Image (cartoon, rainbow, N blue to C red):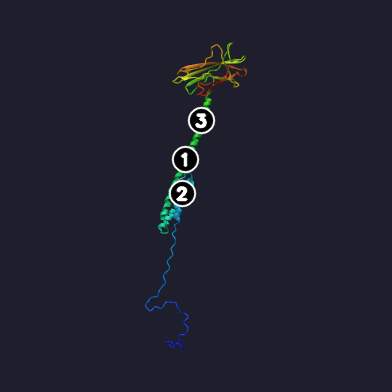
Amino acid sequence: MTTPASPEGSSTTGRQPQDHNPWAPPPSSSSSAGEVRPLPYPVPTGQPRNGMGITALVLGLVGLVLGLFIILFWISWLPALLAIVFGSIGVSQARKGLTTNKPMAVTGLVMGIVGLLISVGSAVFAVVAVKHVVDEARAKVKESKEERKSAAAEEKARHLSFGETYTFGNGLKVTVAEPAPFTPDAFAHGHAKGNKAVQVTVTVVNTGKERVSVPTGLPDVNDADGASAELVIDGSGRQKVITGYVLPGRTAVGKYAFSLPPAAADRIEVEFSPDAMRWDDAYWSGPTH
């Protein structure tokens, strides 16, 4: 069989051109159609930078919570201050359209400000409290020193020489006279042979406006060695014990005899209090004759 010839007289069995694409669309029949251009690629946009707002919110919350504890004020100011810084940056970025969490940044900023104010207030409160404690401690120390000083002065004031007067808190003025020699009678009790007997005279004057009870009107006497002297009782009637009440403006006088050993009879100390349950003893001391 013979192959028909092409109209141009060439054979159809010839090779196709090398640039022929069998899958290409057919050429446009209109010569006036423009060339089809590819669509442009979209311009890439960055992700919103919301880190500042989130950081401000977290730090503001931490600073606010820590500020509620007064003892933690010294660390609460730092996160609160950082929350203000990051919150301000976040708000600025939001105004430029770089972030989408402006409310979060504003909240963190506000919480930072509040937390910083609380921290400052806690610091002021702590300083005032510490100052108050220190002042109170100093006042107690000063008061204690004054009390000791007053007690020492009072103790010194309660040690007198014979013939001097001491006024008790109930208004009674007490004077102990210099001891005088005393000779017990033959029926004396409490006086050993060879001892020295002395008489102690106690005078009590009521300087107040009300009568005052004297429940303990008997003095104690210590010899030169500090030992208690024996009270001498005889039938001469020369001893007199202060008892009962002392009326306003009145005077009560008590006379007592004591026996002293010869080796410790050159000096004595007399202790006396009108009411030993309320008032400490006053002391009179001096030589005997």
Side (left or right) of 236 relative to 26? right
Amino acid under label 1?
A: Ala
Q: Which mark is residue 63?
A: 2
Q: Which residue is mark 3?
A: 147
User: Residue at left 43%, top 50%?
Assistant: 111
- Would residue 85 be visible to someone looking at this image? no
Answer yes or no: do the residues labelled 1 and 3 have beta carbons within 8 Å? no
Alpha carbon of mark 1 to alpha carbon of mark 3: how far? Answer: 26 Å
Crowding around mark 3 (Cα neighbors within 10 Å: few <14, some 14 to 19, many 20+) is few
User: Is residue 19 placed above or below 64 in the rendered structure?
Assistant: below
Residue 273's disc is none
Instruction: Give the camera-side residue of 272 and 63.
Output: 63
Residue 142 image position (x, y, % from top left):
50, 33
Crowdedness of circle 2 by 10 Å Cα count: few (<14), some, many (20+)? many
- Give the mark nearest the N terminus, 3 or 2: 2
Residue 190 as seen in the image, left or right of residue 1: right
Residue placed under numbered mark 1 in the picture = 129
Q: Where residue 203 appears, x then y in whole percent?
A: 50, 17
The amino acid on which the numbered mark 2 sits, given as a three-letter code, is Gly
Q: Amino acid at mark 3?
A: Glu
Lower position in the chain sequence, tag 1 or tag 3: 1
Q: Nearer the viewer, residue 6 or 213?
A: 6
Residue at x 50%, y 34% (from the top left corner): 140
Q: Are marks 3 and 2 in contact (CB under 8 Å)?
A: no
